Amino acid sequence: MLLEELRNRHDGETVWVFGSGPSLNFLDPKFFEDKITISTNTAAKAFGVKPDYVFSHYHHVAHSLLNDVGTVVTIELDTKSYQPWSSEKPDSLVIAKTPHEHPQGSSWNPFTRHTPKENEIVYGSSSLHGAMHLGAHLGANFIVLVGADCGYIDSTDNLQGYNKGHPYPHRLYNEHHKLMKEWLVREYGVTVYSLNPFVNLNLEGHKFEGV
């Protein structure tokens, strides 16, 4: 399958995009049963949701999810090995081009050096950006981020059962998440929110530590 075949597949709808932050530990997977979902890497799987789509710039992660997800989107060159996809290519797999081979660290900016062309997927320091871009490409009017916390809740910074692989650079993620939102608003006119599982921002007595 080609990325262009997904364009506006969910035109005007709300798409829920999973990160792997600790707020997921306070949510019920059943809430998402009737919703269009995109997972960043294995976040939705660890949470107990079978997502409609996954974005990952790691080929081994994309490959591991091919039998569990409707559509898996990855990039041409794996972020770790810098090699092209080497396994079979089922119809459920989309291999997208990117405006850069790999994330550019703190210098990443979709407005300037890393602006994607048509039918490319952009991402910065996190796979979450690619998942957000995929939501906009699908035609969403609203993107709701789930678990894009950029911090700790009760000293935990990720979803239970999620193998994060390396320490999260929360400050960098926070800066890039805001950039990605601003770019999507400008380019797609999409509205981006974030789901709070608590009754309000006081977090019902839980402690949040951010950047």
Image (cartoon, rainbow, N blue to C red):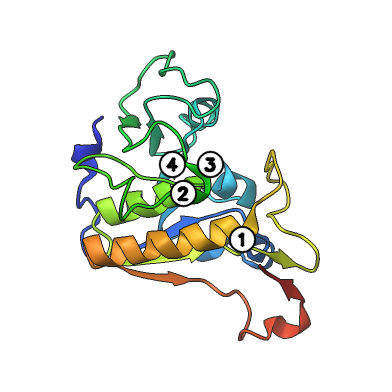
**Residue type marked 2:** Ser
- Gap between marks 4 and 2, in whole Å? 22 Å
The residue to which callout 4 is attached is 55
The alpha-carbon separation of the residues under discs 3 and 4 comes to 6 Å
Disc 1 residue type (three-letter): Arg
Q: Earlier in the sequence, mark 4 or mark 2?
A: 4
**Circle 1 Cα neighbour tier, 10 Å, few/some/many (<14 / 14–19 / ≥20):** few
Disc 1 target residue: 171
Residue extending furthest toward the right: 155
Q: Earlier in the sequence, mark 1 or mark 4?
A: 4
Q: Decide: marks 3, 4 in contact (CB < 8 A)? A: yes
Residue 208 located left or right of residue 135: right
Q: Type of residue at label 4? A: Phe
> Of the residues under marks 2 and 3, which one precedes in the sequence?
3
**Residue with the mark numbered 2:** 107
153, 24: nearer the viewer = 153
Circle 3 packing at 10 Å, graded few (<14), some (14-19), many (20+), is many
